[in-house]
Image (spheres, helix red, strand yellow):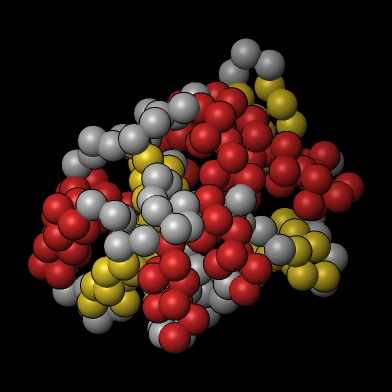
């Protein structure tokens, strides 16, 4: 994982330095951008960026605009930073394909831990890491999902959620368990975050989406009929 390039985009130089210092200590290469336009210039020039840490409120192009532009061409993982903490912003971020959403102030160590977790789970697995149940096949190494042999495009968090469901086939999962396992133990989210992702996941899986059962008052269970 050492040497992977991380693009840190924030108009506050102190914030960029704080994040960069912690990432550099872990062996990452850090590229900094002070606004959205600079970030996009770097992104188009450098094809080896492994992950983007992106602030929402910035001049020239805000984080939402950058995210939309990046998602037109790439599925590179995006961690969005915001000072707002508004649930509507969080849901908008997930709609745009944001993989993680962290409110300021935050612990740099936790941010680095999330960066490492995302990178481990996007292409760092072994080729034999394949799950296949009920016509749904997950290739962890390639980060690909197929349904009855056809590719299904999932966001990073949708991929993680589906993987977690298949790994716990037939087991009733509380929302707290799902948050802790998929969004990490320190994620202070709400059930609506899970529900939103489950709704999208069911839609993308088509008829196979019925495998994800709602257990009212508890959570969800993946179960093949």
Residue at figure coordinates x 62%, y 13% from the top left? 217
User: Which quadrant of the view contains residue 211?
Assistant: top right
Outermost residue toward the top in this view: 217
Residue at figure coordinates x 30%, y 78% from the top left? 4
Residue 90: % across, % down: 51, 36
Residue 156: % across, % down: 55, 57
Residue at figure coordinates x 79%, y 52% from the top left? 205
* Nearest the eye: 69 or 96: 69
* Nearest the eye: 159 or 200: 200
Residue at figure coordinates x 80%, y 62% from the top left? 147
Residue 93: % across, % down: 54, 44
Indicate left or right for 4 with 40 as reference.
left
In the rendered image, the vertical position of residue 132 relative to residue 190, given as above or below: below
**Total number of numbered labels?**
0
* Nearest the eye: 211 or 193: 193
Indicate left or right for 193 with 52 as reference.
right
Indicate left or right for 199 with 115 as reference.
right
Look at the image and tell me whether residue 174 can be seen: no
Q: Quadrant of the N terminus?
A: bottom left
User: Which quadrant of the view contains residue 152?
Assistant: bottom right
In the rendered image, the vertical position of residue 21 relative to residue 128, given as above or below: above
Indicate left or right for 32 with 54 as reference.
left
């Amino acid at each position: 994982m050492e040497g992977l390039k991380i693009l840190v985009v924030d108009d506050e130089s102190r914030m960029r330095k704080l994040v960069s210092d912690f990432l550099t200590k872990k062996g990452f290469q850090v590229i900094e951008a002070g606004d959205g336009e600079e970030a996009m210039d770097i992104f188009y020039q450098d094809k080896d960026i492994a992950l983007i840490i992106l602030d929402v409120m910035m001049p020239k192009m805000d984080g939402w605009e950058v995210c939309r532009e990046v998602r037109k061409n790439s599925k590179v993982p995006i961690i969005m930073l915001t000072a707002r903490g508004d649930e509507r912003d969080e849901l908008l971020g997930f709609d745009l394909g944001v993989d993680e959403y962290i409110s300021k102030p935050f612990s740099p160590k936790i941010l680095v831990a999330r960066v490492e977790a995302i990178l481990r789970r996007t292409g760092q697995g072994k080729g034999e890491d394949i799950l296949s149940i009920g016509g749904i096949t997950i290739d962890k190494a390639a980060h690909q999902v197929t349904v009855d042999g056809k590719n299904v495009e999932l966001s990073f968090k949708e991929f993680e959620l589906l993987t977690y469901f298949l790994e716990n086939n037939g087991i009733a999962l509380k929302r707290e368990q799902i948050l802790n396992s998929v969004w990490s133990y320190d994620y202070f989210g709400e059930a609506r975050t899970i529900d939103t992702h489950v709704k999208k996941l069911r839609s993308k899986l088509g008829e196979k989406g019925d495998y994800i059962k709602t257990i009212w008052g508890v959570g969800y269970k993946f179960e093949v009929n």
